[in-house]
Amino acid sequence: MSETLLDGLSRLITPELLDGLAGQVNAPESAVSKGLSAIMPALLGGVATRAKEPSFMSTLFGLVTDSGNDAGLLGNPQSLFGGGSSPAMALGGSLLNSVFGKQLDSIVGKVASFAGISPAAASSMFKFGAPVVLSMLGKKVKDDGMDVSSLGKLLSSEKDKYIAAAPSALGSLEDLIREPRQVHAAPPPPPPVAEKKSIWRWLIPLLIALAIGWFLLQSMGGGDGSAQRAAPSAMAPSAAVVYFDADSSDIPAGTAAKLMPVISYLKANPGSKVDVTGYHDASGDAMSNEELARARAAAVQQALQAGGIDGGRINLAKPMISTGSGTPEDARRVEVSVSR
């Protein structure tokens, strides 16, 4: 019988690893072992539960193939001890937010109760386990030459084994994963004033109006040569804004249509590149907010690539804090700007 991904992760849990992790989270080694026996199948089970969602798999594959996903972790997972803001830890945080969303605190609490450790210790163990899971997935993808479709099929085929390995004390993983999507399915309408908050919401219509005026002027014989040369530049679609649901990095419906003018421009102008910037709220946990903004930007990057734009022409900018008097919706946006 072939080894599953969970079998591979289980082999990494050595006495030396347990001893070191127990010291990191200040908990008995036996409790840490019990906690990991719940965390690893919970992580894989959560990922496998969503393996048939194209938008989630696009985000997951982006995390798995990211240059910061360190395959060396499988040979030395202790290198994660001490936390910090390494690329591997940041990617792991994005994975946790993508899989569990607002239910992460709930499942952390269930693991803490099951293992007899504090919620803080359980949270630290999830942050340790997530980059290790990504490293295992990255190795599998590289070794077997997988694409996003074959990775999804593998996860779906092993899903029942992950679910069966998760302690019953965690309840139904499928319900935990499903609940955030029910919340996001019908988000409250944004306040009417939101239309005034983003420069692009009035700038793009203004540019369109100017372009129409220019064409009318030319049709009547007005304007000089310099004006004729300037108009195409003003008309170029230079930006798009994608607004995400709260606590989610799933690509919203209609994103492809929003990105199409930018994609068309990039295809017509091979020398142009594009900057993708995720924004987040200044309140709350700064690291978690930044990781969520980075995951949203990565999801938009995947959507651009799916539209035929080479990844080398897409720059993922550092996540930005949304400041000023913007609405909560503004703090959940990703801006796409063409650089000529």
Image (cartoon, helix red, strand yellow):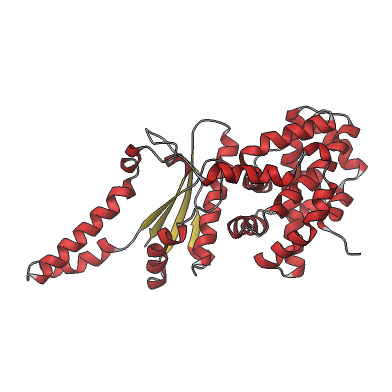
Is 158 on the left-hand or right-hand side of 226?
right
Is 227 on the left-hand or right-hand side of 63?
left
Q: For residue 81, what is the image quadrant? A: top right
Q: For residue 196, what is the image quadrant? A: top left
Is 189 on the left-hand or right-hand side of 30?
left
> What residue is at 50 percent from the left and 44 percent from the top?
186
> What residue is at 47 percent from the left and 54 percent from the top?
276
Residue 110: percent from left, percent from top: 76, 33
Q: Is residue 294 above or below residue 271?
A: above
Residue 93 visible (yes or no): no
Pick the quarter of the image with the C terminus.
Answer: bottom left
Pick the quarter of the image with the N terminus.
Answer: bottom right
Q: Is residue 231 above or below residue 249?
A: below
Instruction: Please state which of residues 116 and 66 is positioned toward the viewer in this rendering.
Output: 116
Instruction: Please state which of residues 150 and 11 is positioned toward the viewer in this rendering.
Output: 150
Residue 193: percent from left, percent from top: 32, 37
Q: Is residue 169 above or below residue 226?
A: above
Q: Seen from this angle, which residue lies furthest left?
A: 221
> What residue is at 49 percent from the left and 57 percent from the top?
315
Residue 54: percent from left, percent from top: 60, 60
Residue 159 visible (yes or no): yes
Residue 183: percent from left, percent from top: 56, 41
